[in-house]
Image (spheres, grey):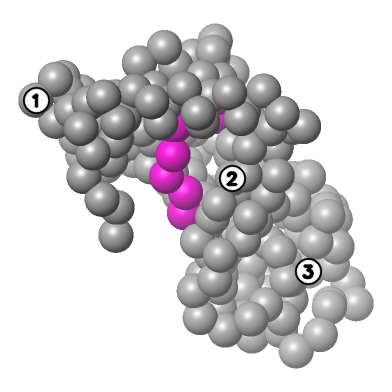
Amino acid sequence: MRCLTTPLTAALLAVVVLSGCATGYTLDNTVLTFSQLAAPPAQAGYRFERLPSQLAAGPMQVALEQTAEPALSKAGLRRDDTSPRYSVQVSAREEEVLSPFADPWSYRGGWGWGWGGGYAGRGIGVGIGSSMYPSRFEQLWFRREVSVVLRDLGTQQVVYETRALNDGPWSDARVVFPLMFEAAMQGFPNPPPGPRRVDIHVGG
């Protein structure tokens, strides 16, 4: 649970955090995974599978899959569109919410989850902004989620499902989303049971 802060406290906190960001920061993720795999698969080839809504997203969904691919490779899976054993479905979403350190009376942003192609319709190539650290730190906060579903094409059964959630002030989705996929795949194929925290250090 986060404590309420005054605008002055929030401003001081912003200075401290942004000063520390010069040498990097920790991206903390809450990860929840369900696995039916007892051991690393001998044939780890996969192809991407898309829902109808993801097909409609076109290039944005392709870019999202490219964003997830390094994390899948790091987990021991390899892209094989010719004779794969598995299909992989990836998705991501984000919303901009009120910062827990903000003055709620000065907030003018919007609320609500936004599903869509790519990153909630914002566009992967463009990203959210040119700056990693927004000037109004105390009023910018992002809640994000990524998910990966692995299906055995022989049995059509889902054998691995994982998702990672993060909320924080980091505005550059092009940096954050690939690391969230990495967090989601950590421990493959036998991750610890139940929700867990997976920290990834960025920069520094």
Give the number of the disc on residue 196. none
The crowding category of the residue bearing disc 3, from other C-alpha atoms within 10 Å (few below 14, some 14 to 19, many at least 20), is some
Which residue position is annotated with label 2? 27
Q: Earlier in the sequence, mark 3 or mark 1?
A: 3
Which residue position is annotated with label 1? 105
Q: For numbered disc 3, what is the local secondary structure?
A: loop
Left or right: 64 in relation to 185: left
Q: Quadrant of residue 108?
A: top left
Residue 41 percent location from the top left of the image: 84, 77
Q: Name the kind of residue labelled 3 in the image.
A: Arg
Q: For numbered disc 2, what is the local secondary structure?
A: strand
Q: Name the kind of residue labelled 2 in the image.
A: Leu
Name the residue located 48 percent from the left edge and 44 percent from the top edge: 92
| Stretch of the chain drawn in magenta | 165-173
Q: CA distance from mark 3 to mark 1?
A: 53 Å
Residue 35 percent location from the top left of the image: 62, 80
**Viewport quadrant of the C terminus:** top right
